[in-house]
Amino acid sequence: MIGIYDCFGYDVPFSERYKLIKDAGFDCVMLWWSDKFGRGSGYREDVKLARNAGVTVENIHAPVHEQNNLSMDDRNGESVYQSYLQCVQDCNEYGIPTVVIHLPDDNYPVSDLGLKRIETIVQQAENCDVKIAFENLGNIRNLELVLKTFKSPNAGFCYDSCHHANYAPQCDLFEKYGDRLAALHLHDNGGKNNQHRLPFDGKVSWETVIKKITLAGYKGATSLEPMNWDYEDISIREFLERAFRKAQKLDDMRKLVLTL
């Protein structure tokens, strides 16, 4: 399957957006899961809109605005904790298999309180048969702590190609967590924000990335997480067509690795 993150830019209603995603060739989508980024309070309704358009929902992305508060013993810490619990419950309610979560940046170390909260979140995921995919950013020490502490099959890893290249290129994340891959965020670096470009438009070594993803045994969707920040001069339809061609190339590379 080939997928794409749904909040990639353009002022187009989501009812129309999912149809365009399907028309471009994509099989599945990853949904931003909060009222931020212009989604509004009805964001949960987008699950039905996506499915009505003929695309499956691969995962949801938990809110990121409070991620560094996870270990705080105050209302802010409780807020992010409760939002992650709610995401797991929403996955269960809407039949979505996975939620992607950002751990705090490494300058906000996960404390005993943070670990206790994550333990409860993981237990909730086990009870609901939902997978949590913790994503790599500038959080390599926190990621290592959490994935070493929680060996549950419901606690996995979301690999982000651009974050890897930008934040921790020296760290072999596949050697550490390849057998726990539960989601992919494939995008390239460079451009005005040095991230979220379409594959092959930056400096990510895609042959290396795809080989390691494939040899890790990952069987899930080849999913892109681009934004239109460097592509605002083209239409949403052209953006999606270009994105699909690049995603198809990555997917073909995965298949080629298996034949070698």
Image: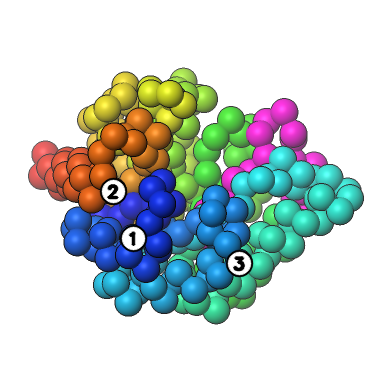
Label whose residue precedes the other's in the sequence (2 or 3):
3
Q: Which residue has dot 3 on it?
A: 41
Q: CA distance from mark 2 to mark 1?
A: 9 Å
Q: Amino acid at mark 1?
A: Arg
Q: Quadrant of residue 57?
A: bottom left
Is residue 244 shown to the viewer in this render? Answer: no
Q: Position of residue 165 (x, y in %)?
A: 42, 25
Q: How far is mark 3 from mark 1, CA to CA?
A: 18 Å
Residue 129 has which mark?
Answer: none
- Image vertical order of residue 86 relative to residue 67, above or below: below
Measured as percent of width and height from the top left, residue 68 is found at 72, 40
Tell me: 225 left or right of 149: left
Is 42 situated left or right of 240 in this image?
right
User: If the image is split into quadrants, where does the C terminus sit?
Assistant: top left
Instruction: Identify the residue under disc 1.
Output: 17
Q: Earlier in the sequence, mark 2 or mark 1?
A: 1
Residue at 54% across / 54% down in the picture? 38
In the image shown, does 141 or 54 lie closer to the viewer? Answer: 54
Magenta-drawn stretch contains 105: yes
Disc 2 + disc 1, Cβ < 8 Å: yes
Nearest to the observer: residue 218 or residue 238: 238
In the displayed structure, 133 sits above or below 48; it is above
Which residue is labeled 2 in the image? 236
Foreground: 231 or 173? 231
Q: Residues within 10 Å of mark 1 (few under 14, many from 20)?
A: many
